[in-house]
Image (tube, helix red, strand yellow):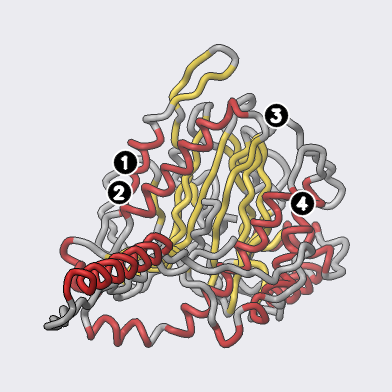
Amino acid sequence: MTTVDGTANAASAIEKGVGELSVSKENLTTNNTANDSDDGGDSAEEDAENKEGAAKKKKNKKRNKKKKKKSGAGAAGQSETLSVPVSQLFPNNSYPVGEICDYVDDNKYRTTSEEMRAKDRLNEKQLFDLRRAAEVHREVRKSMRQRIKPGMDLTTIAETIENGTRSLVEVNGLEAGIGFPTGLSINHCAAHFTPNAGDHVVLQQDDVLKVDFGVQVNGNIVDSAFTMSWNPRYDPLLQAVKEATNTGVREAGIDVRLGDIGAAIQEVMESYEIELDGKTTHIKPIRNLCGHNIGPYLIHSGKSVPIVANHDQTRMEEGELFAIETFGSTGNGYVMEEGACSHYAKVGGEHASPRITSAKKLLQTITKNFGTLPFCRRYLDRLGESHYYLGLKSLVDSGIVNAYPPLCDVKGSYTAQFEHTFILRPTVKEVLSRGEDY
């Protein structure tokens, strides 16, 4: 996600698959021919009527059984331990297609335009990569939504998500792997928290947990998030944010102004209210958090999608990949940096060589393993790095690496998040991360 006022930079947001929403229709026609016979009589006519009636009943029975084609068959053969790569479950790039949304109004022609279809075919490789990443996300989150329970340690949750992602995507350096550190932000903390080594945070029964993780294939990142709670009193908060995110996704399209999307999201979010401890309050969008577009190996590629109305006239464009994420709060609707940092990302472009030896060595490790993808301290620990704090601080101070501390509303408040990634194809909008869960 992105902050809009400088509280944090814009680089990190850090089951079944849903396939193409189409209805397979059959022309169920009855070809009735009347064969008159001179010696048929009433009995022959009755037999014909009976046969015709039986045929119609049989065909009606078949018609009633015909159901709308389900989108994206998902992976029936996935193991409980998340160990079967999706490439084995969907050979030859046969990954489920995301939710397909036809363009409307001035862009309606795109759906049937031969020129647009030709342009669409040029992007097949990217679509295969994105659908592969999206299917990994769906399968991992389907498993985790069943596993995550109060009493679990956040480190265990994060590592289970990340190990499952590595297995299903067949991690291979920068070609395929984790898109950014798993965000596990609780209650008033809205984003950018993942446990560091030594952190022992245990999930409680009354917690509201945001789960935000990403998958990348050849730098094509799918970024999606959801919120879990175990106390029904928070249901209105979760429903408000889920509906606001769906609104943002629905309003998005080629040539749509970003400010208009923010206005639609805000209207939906603020229409919900919640009662906590005898006090009723309207749910507020967190106004300094935003969605974002996504570039190759860049979780934020320059454009921010607000979740409140503003005067941003910037438009979405053909071919762009976006993550619409909305955050709702029972607090002030404004976040600030709070607590120890865990999320980092190298800034793109050329940099002067660090003067400190430890920083120079650490930068080599970061460049080799993450490039410009976000990372966290646990990932450095996993690579065998140690005593890197001074080097990391030097890289941050010199502007080579950006730090992204946790973003929190006022203590005592509760926040929720939902997020989807979609691509504005030349012919249609494809919501890649859509699933049966959200």
In the displayed structure, 319 sits above or below 161; it is below
Q: Name the residue under label 4.
A: 157
Label 2 sits on what residue type? Gly
| Front: mark 1 or 4 | 4
Drawn side of residue 115 relative to residue 196, left or right: left
**First in residue order: circle 3 vs circle 2:** 3
Q: Residue 206 carries which label?
A: 3
Q: Is mark 3 on a helix, strand or loop?
A: loop
Q: 117 or 20: nearer the eye?
A: 20
- In the rendered image, residue 305, in percent from the top left (x then y), is placed at 39, 52
Label 3 sits on what residue type? Asp
Find the distance from the CA under tag 3 to the CA under tag 2.
Answer: 35 Å
The residue at the point 31 percent across, 63 percent down is 316
Find the distance from the CA under tag 2 to the CA under tag 4.
Answer: 36 Å
Q: Residue 309 carries which label?
A: 1
Q: Label 2 crowding class (10 Å Cα cut-off): few <14, some 14-19, many 20+?
A: many
